């Protein structure tokens, strides 16, 4: 996807489901105060719609959704439901302005999970949508396992949903089996045959969730379903920070998000979920702007754009020059200048083998104090 290939001016909206699909990650539970805090952060950064939870669960889940609704956020607040009228009533009790109505559309799900027929699926979906429509809420109809569904049936499903009053179709790549090329063709076909707004809901089982979300948007989808740091069942979902930054820097669409908050919200969700925020995580990982290799560090010192696609401050990070086995003299000189120590070219060249040897023996990069100790041992103490 070349820069600007997703046409600027498109009205793309971000639907965050960290509090629903993200919390469905095996072993993850958010305390109510954490759910409320995450909702506030999502709203502050610019998320258009927050899927706040599953009200029919009752108890703490329903209380949390009610608390989020009472915050009076700018974002739309959505409750997730099965295609069951009583589920939707629980969402309405919370005061949400949007409901997701979810039901499987693939034959493998219809036969083995629901143990019913396509006609039953259509009938129950339509009844649920018609009920929600009378309540005046925004309606997303979720085609679960859409990526394994027969296209003709999916077209019929989407058409019936639209007739019943649905505002959009959530295209769910439930088990993450799509690739961007297939995604583009399927979404293009669906939009041309039905003419309904599409939300991409992509999972990361083969590492293509973000790519598939972008492919769907390129094909005409108007909504991207995401979670913070890609939290979600199994391998997770398309990551909020990845989709927003890729749209901005690759697709040419700036959604106006407060992206400088991305690292902060990533850290909070990581802590609340008990899930690691890897140093190598795309966009918000600490290694995004850490340079050790001599060639890379030299280039970044001369002009950061040589090895950075955007400024670290844009996502709440800082540039780091790391000194270790692969460092060169330019990086070493720059690092010691931070300590107020001027190394000339010969001194840096003489010191570098000591630095590299220490890094190899320790099997890691070196801390600031370790670098100073090595300097003192080699040259003698010097102001």
Image (cartoon, rainbow, N blue to C red):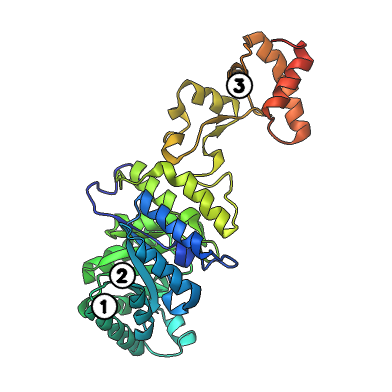
Is residue 47 visible in the rendered structure shown here? yes
**Image check: 331 left or right of 156?**
right
Res. 318 mark: none
Q: From mark 3 to mark 2, how far is it between C-alphas? A: 53 Å
Instruction: Where is residue 333? Give x, y as percent.
Output: 61, 16
47 to 24, vertically: above or below: above
Disc 3: which residue: 335
Task: Of the two numbered discs 1 and 3 on the same chain, state the one appearing first in sequence.
Answer: 1
First along the sequence among labels 3 and 2: 2
The residue carrying pointer 2 sits among few (fewer than 14), some (14 to 19) or many (20 or more) residues within 10 Å by Cα, namely many
Residue in front for this viewpoint, 248 or 286: 286
Query: In this picture, is 295 found above or below 243?
Result: above
Look at the picture and state if 170 lies above or below 208. below
Q: Nearer the viewer, residue 248 or 296?
A: 248
Q: Which mark is residue 98?
A: 2
Residue under numbered circle 1: 161
Q: Are marks 1 and 3 in contact (CB under 8 Å)?
A: no
Q: Position of residue 94 (x, y in %)?
A: 36, 73
Q: Earlier in the sequence, mark 1 or mark 2?
A: 2
Q: CA distance from mark 1 to mark 3?
A: 61 Å
Q: Mark 1, residues whose alpha carbon is within 10 Å: few (<14), some, or many (≥20)?
A: many
Q: Position of residue 273 (x, y in %)?
A: 56, 59
Circle 3 SS class: helix
Q: Position of residue 148 (x, y in %)?
A: 42, 73
In the rendered view, would you say 288 is above or below 170? Answer: above
Disc 3 crowd rating (10 Å Cα; few below 14, some 14-19, many 20+) is many
In this rendered view, identify the residue nearer to me: 208 or 273.
Answer: 273
């Amino acid at each position: 996807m070349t820069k600007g290939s997703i046409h600027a001016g498109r009205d793309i909206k971000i639907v965050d489901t960290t509090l629903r699909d993200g919390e469905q990650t095996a072993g993850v539970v958010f305390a109510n105060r954490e759910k409320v805090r995450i909702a506030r952060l999502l709203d502050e950064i610019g998320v258009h719609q927050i899927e706040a939870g599953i009200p029919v669960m009752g108890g703490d889940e329903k209380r949390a959704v009610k608390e989020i609704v009472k915050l009076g956020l700018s974002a739309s607040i959505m409750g997730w439901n099965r295609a069951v009228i009583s589920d939707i009533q629980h969402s309405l009790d919370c005061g949400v302005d949007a409901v997701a109505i979810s039901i499987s559309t693939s034959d493998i799900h219809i036969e083995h999970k629901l143990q019913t027929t396509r006609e039953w699926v259509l009938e129950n979906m339509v009844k649920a949508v018609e009920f929600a429509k009378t309540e005046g809420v925004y309606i997303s109809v979720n085609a679960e396992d859409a990526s394994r569904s027969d296209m003709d049936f999916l077209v019929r499903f989407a058409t019936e949903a639209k007739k019943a009053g649905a505002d959009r179709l959530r295209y769910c790549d439930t088990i993450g089996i799509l690739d961007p090329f297939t995604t583009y063709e399927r979404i293009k076909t669906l939009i041309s045959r039905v003419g309904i707004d599409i939300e991409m809901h992509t999972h990361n089982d083969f590492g293509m969730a973000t790519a598939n979300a972008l492919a769907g948007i390129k094909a005409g989808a108007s909504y991207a379903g995401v979670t913070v740091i890609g939290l979600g069942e199994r391998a997770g979902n398309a990551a909020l920070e990845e989709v927003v930054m890729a749209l901005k820097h690759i697709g040419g669409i700036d959604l106006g998000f407060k992206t400088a908050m991305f690292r902060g919200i990533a850290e909070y969700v990581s802590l609340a979920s008990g899930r690691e925020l890897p140093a190598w995580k795309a966009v918000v990982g600490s290694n995004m702007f850490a340079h050790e290799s001599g060639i890379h560090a030299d280039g970044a010192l001369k002009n950061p754009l040589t090895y950075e696609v955007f400024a670290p401050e844009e996502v709440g990070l800082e540039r780091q020059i790391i000194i270790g086995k692969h460092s060169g003299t330019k990086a070493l000189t720059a690092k010691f200048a931070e300590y107020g120590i001027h190394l000339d070219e010969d001194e840096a060249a003489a010191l570098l083998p000591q630095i590299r040897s220490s890094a190899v023996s320790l099997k890691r990069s070196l801390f600031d104090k370790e670098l100073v100790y090595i300097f003192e041992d080699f040259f003698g103490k010097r102001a």
